[in-house]
Image: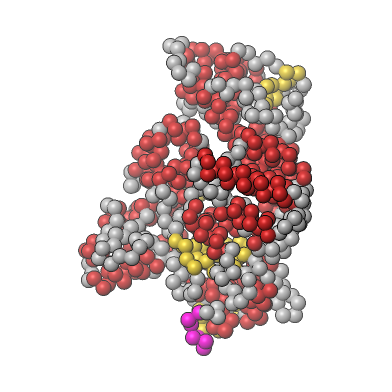
């Protein structure tokens, strides 16, 4: 049965469904959709609503092997039949299907196509979940899933082109089902999801997120033995089919279930039980970083490590890794997981008092006298705080020293008051929470925010190494491997499109320097410009004078992110990086190359290069090697940006 759109459509409107067999109804009556080839054309247009579909894509969908000489003429006949079925747009009286330079474009609204309604409900449900309104989230996600009638376009999957579109739609449905099941589990209503999860795991046995949700739903329902069996079955399947092990997060869940005996997971664990846990949505396109994620999860699960620094160049995916780990570690931090952005939207750093004020509001910290710790109450006129209140107990800074709020913030910058700092440290000593401080500018900024005692942990992400913090554990991120970068690009543009020209796809990710930010922006741009051949886009990115112009998607600009990182550098480091960008573009540089580019002696060159390494602008070999034998590198896009600044070609757009 085709479910009607959420809003009543005008009489005579045709309502199409792709989330099952291709069907259409008008005023409650099913409509004939014509012969198979006509339905293939209609399905392909509907699978890409309000987007130009190239003629070649339509041709491949109808005749995947050997199109006849009359293919274009036949397509025109099928498109004409689609126009007759769809009628004109009630808003302007124009044809719903029009032809332009990009191909055929079908205009259709949310109330006329189930996939558009599905997408709208899913977005609203996720937004409600991010606000903490789990009941509304569960209801909206369930409404979206009620539109899912079975494998999308299951009557037309013998066409390779339609099958690829159908797989994309099914993956979207599975993700929404996982969102819904996890929300129901957090609400303590796991029983409603158990059977559906079992059925989906049988159809998609290697999808780990489904398995984890099934384990949690069984465990919360008091069925511990079955929950543990789900893990054992999956471990054996992975070893047999792929030679792999389950992820560290799933293994940790298994061990936790063993330790909890038959006690079911408490209702509404997570956001509601954790003092209002506040995390941005988990990055859905998170790719690669398996070893780094495994290391970070192990560190945060250890009682010995309280502070972890995740460092790397601009755009290397530091925030995504930290958030991925935070979302996977809910059971390990019963008093909450909190994320605070340390910088403003323009890239400038907030004051420590502002950050502490936000942490106080999120965690419910009470200052002396019973009041909260809003930012305005945490500010004093001083520009420094004493080491007693601002330095961790293990810091090497002398006890009688004063610690400035941070460089280049000046004497007017606000500092943390003694009472607010003491209240924060008392809260950390009594709670087991995970704090993610994102995009930290320097060591001085965070010293007073780090726990001196207690079970809480802090993850710091930073472009620089934060070498002045000790003792902390460090995880340095470099670029993605080619395979990981291609996997990320595939998630954004679709595996079918990537397979059309894998060599060009590889050129794209390499031209992006294999940085997750740049590959993501390039993928988003290609997802909108569906007519653009991958080879042409690869050529554009390969042009050093145009690459940064091409890496813009909506309001996300790689150049602007590079500019923010550039401003963090000292004037001397900027000058040196501009001079080193030339040799770095040729495949890296040695110490001798640095001496030549900088026009200085060996000691000065070593100090300059190591200063840039500390700032996160230059990468060095992972193992021990002498300065003369080392090959230093600068990320390609940072090289291009530095050359722009050196040559005076910089424009902020």
Which SS does the magenta portion mostly show? loop
The quadrant holding residue 543 is: top left
Is residue 386 found inside the magenta-colored segment of the image? no
Q: Along the horizontal axis of the image, is 379 left or right of 469?
A: right
The quadrant holding residue 149 is: top right
Is residue 400 found inside the magenta-colored segment of the image? yes
Percent x, y for residue 168?
57, 34
Q: In this orientation, does residue 101 appear?
A: yes
**On-image quarter of the N terminus:** top right
Q: Which residues are magenta?
A: 395-401
Between 207 and 366, the one lying in front of the other is 207
Percent x, y for residue 18?
64, 27
Q: By what rule are the colours in the image chosen? A: secondary structure
Percent x, y for residue 450?
57, 73
Q: Is residue 598 above or below residue 584?
A: below
Name the residue rendered at 31%, 71% in the picture: 607
Name the residue rendered at 41%, 48% in the picture: 481
Q: In this orientation, does residue 420 appear?
A: no
Q: Is residue 590 above or below residue 424?
A: above
Name the residue rendered at 51%, 60% in the picture: 295
Name the residue rendered at 59%, 77% in the picture: 452
Percent x, y for residue 457?
59, 68
The number of discs equals 0
């Amino acid at each position: 049965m085709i479910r009607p759109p959420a809003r009543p459509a005008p009489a005579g409107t045709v309502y199409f469904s792709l989330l099952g067999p291709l069907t259409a109804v008008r005023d409650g009556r099913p409509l004939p959709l014509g012969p198979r080839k006509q339905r293939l054309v209609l399905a392909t247009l509907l699978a890409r609503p309000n987007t130009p579909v190239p003629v070649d894509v339509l041709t491949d969908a109808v005749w995947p092997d050997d199109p006849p000489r009359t293919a274009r003429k036949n397509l025109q006949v099928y498109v004409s039949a689609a126009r007759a079925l769809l009628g004109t747009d009630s808003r302007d009286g124009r044809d719903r299907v029009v032809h332009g330079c990009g191909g055929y474009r079908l205009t259709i609204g949310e109330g006329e196509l189930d996939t558009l309604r599905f997408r709208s409900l899913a977005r609203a449900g996720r937004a409600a979940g991010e606000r903490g309104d789990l009941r509304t989230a569960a209801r909206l996600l369930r409404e979206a899933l009620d539109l899912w009638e079975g494998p999308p376009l299951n009557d037309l999957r013998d066409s390779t082109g339609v099958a690829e579109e159908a797989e994309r739609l099914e993956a979207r449905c599975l993700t929404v089902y996982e969102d819904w099941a996890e929300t129901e589990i957090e609400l303590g209503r796991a029983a409603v999801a158990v059977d559906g999860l079992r059925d989906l795991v049988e159809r998609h046995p290697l999808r780990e997120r489904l398995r984890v949700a099934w384990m949690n739903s069984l465990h919360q329902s008091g069925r511990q033995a079955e929950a543990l069996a789900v893990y054992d079955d999956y471990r054996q399947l992975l070893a047999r089919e792929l030679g792999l092990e389950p992820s560290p997060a799933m293994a940790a869940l298994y061990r936790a279930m063993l330790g909890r005996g038959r006690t079911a997971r408490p209702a509404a664990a997570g956001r509601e039980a954790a003092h209002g846990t506040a995390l941005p949505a988990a990055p859905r396109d998170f790719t690669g970083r398996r070893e780094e994620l495994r290391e970070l999860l192990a560190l945060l699960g250890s009682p010995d490590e309280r502070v972890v620094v995740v460092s790397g160049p601009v755009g290397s995916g530091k925030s995504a890794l930290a958030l991925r780990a935070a979302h996977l570690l809910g059971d390990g931090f019963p008093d909450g997981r909190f994320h605070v952005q340390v910088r403003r939207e323009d890239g400038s750093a907030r004051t420590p008092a502002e950050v502490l004020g936000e942490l106080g509001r999120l965690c419910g910290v009470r200052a002396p006298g019973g009041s909260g710790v809003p930012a305005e109450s945490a500010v004093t006129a001083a520009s420094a705080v004493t080491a007693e209140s601002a330095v961790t107990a293990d810091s090497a800074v002398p006890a009688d020293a004063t610690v400035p709020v941070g460089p280049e913030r000046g004497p007017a910058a606000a500092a943390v008051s003694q009472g607010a700092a003491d209240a924060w440290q008392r809260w950390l000593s009594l709670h087991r929470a995970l704090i993610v401080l994102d995009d930290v500018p320097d060591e001085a900024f965070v010293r007073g925010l780090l726990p001196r005692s207690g079970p809480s942990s802090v993850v710091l992400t930073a472009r620089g190494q934060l070498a002045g913090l000790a003792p902390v554990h460090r995880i340095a991120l470099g670029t993605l491997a080619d395979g990981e970068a291609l996997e990320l690009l595939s998630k954004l543009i679709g595996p079918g499109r990537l397979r059309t020209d894998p060599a060009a796809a590889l050129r794209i990710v390499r031209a992006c320097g294999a940085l997750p930010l740049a590959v993501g922006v390039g993928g988003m741009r290609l997802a909108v410009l569906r007519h653009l051949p991958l080879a042409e886009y690869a050529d554009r990115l390969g042009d050093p004078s145009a690459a940064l112009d091409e890496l813009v998607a909506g309001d996300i600009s790689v150049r602007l992110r590079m500019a923010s990182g550039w401003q963090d550098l000292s004037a001397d480091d900027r000058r040196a990086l501009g001079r080193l960008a030339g040799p770095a573009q040729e495949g890296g540089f040695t110490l001798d190359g640095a001496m030549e580019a900088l026009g200085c002696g060996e000691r000065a060159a070593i100090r300059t290069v190591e200063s840039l390494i500390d700032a996160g602008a230059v990468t060095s070999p992972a193992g021990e090697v002498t300065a003369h034998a080392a090959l230093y590198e600068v990320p390609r896009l940072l090289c291009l940006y530095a050359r722009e600044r050196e040559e005076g070609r910089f424009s902020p757009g």
